[in-house]
Amino acid sequence: MDPLAYRNVPPGTHIPSVVNAIVEIPKGRRNKFEIDKKTGLIRLDRYLYSSSHYPGDYGFIPQTLAEDGDYLDILVMVNEPTFSGCLIEARVVGLFKMKDRGVNDYKVLGVPHTDPLFAEIRRLEDVPQHYLKEVEHFFATYKQLEGIVTETLGWAGPEEATAEVRASVDRYLAQLRESVR
Ligand SMILES: [Mg+2]
């Protein structure tokens, strides 16, 4: 298999409400894995300095460009962790807004689209409210021991989340057009 094949994965089957999530860090892990853009391999970036773990499967939506110059990040609620490189068809239910070192670094919240255990989860109100607190606490604290300040800006619903997906796909396409010019 060509490890760079992920570049050809479209951003979703039903953009902007059903997206493709490529998992880098499975739920429950403290290792911060990330895709190496040159080789397509999964690289160990670091073991989180804080003693905390990712509250869901975490990765990115391919063929997007977020405001921080990277792919748009996504956190997928799962009952069982998948694995690095796994592709999940995810339904967008919300957006966690935050800044990392002063730059917007939003996280889309999704659920596995075809999983009947998540069939009723379509909006933030459908998500256990404590889970939203866990996610907020995780992103507020996970870089503290690195001396990096993250600023959390709270949750937004699916309307704002899908608008962010759309904007990130548009930014990606604009950058692509620019690069072939
Ligand atoms: Mg990011």
Image (cartoon, rainbow, N blue to C red):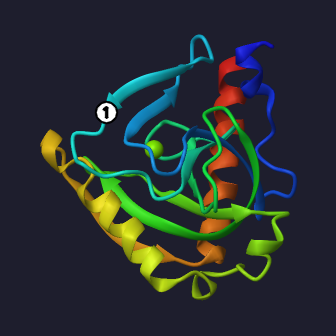
| Quadrant of the displayed image that contains ligand 1 | top left
Determine the image quadrant of residue 152. Answer: bottom left
Does residue 50 appear left or right of residue 97 in this picture? left
Q: Residues within 10 Å of mark 1 (few under 14, many from 20)?
A: few
Q: Residue 157: where, in percent of width, then height?
A: 58, 78
**Residue 65, horizontal then vertical, whole percent:** 59, 41
Q: Most extreme residue toward the bottom, as rendered?
A: 125
**Quadrant in which the C terminus is drawn:** top right
Viewer-nearest residue: 3 or 73? 3
Residue at 46% from the left image edge and 75% from the top image edge: 131
> Is 8 above or below relative to 28?
above
| Residue shown at 42% from the left, 24% from the top | 44
Residue occupied by mark 1: 47
Residue located 62% across and 41% down the image? 23
Figure quadrant of the N terminus: top right
Q: Secondary structure at mark 1?
A: strand
Instruction: Inspect this view and state whether residue 15 appears.
Output: yes
Residue 43 to residue 12: above or below: above
In percent of width and height, residue 75 lies at 55, 56
Residue 172, located in which quarter of the rendered image? Answer: top right
Kind of residue at disc 1: Tyr
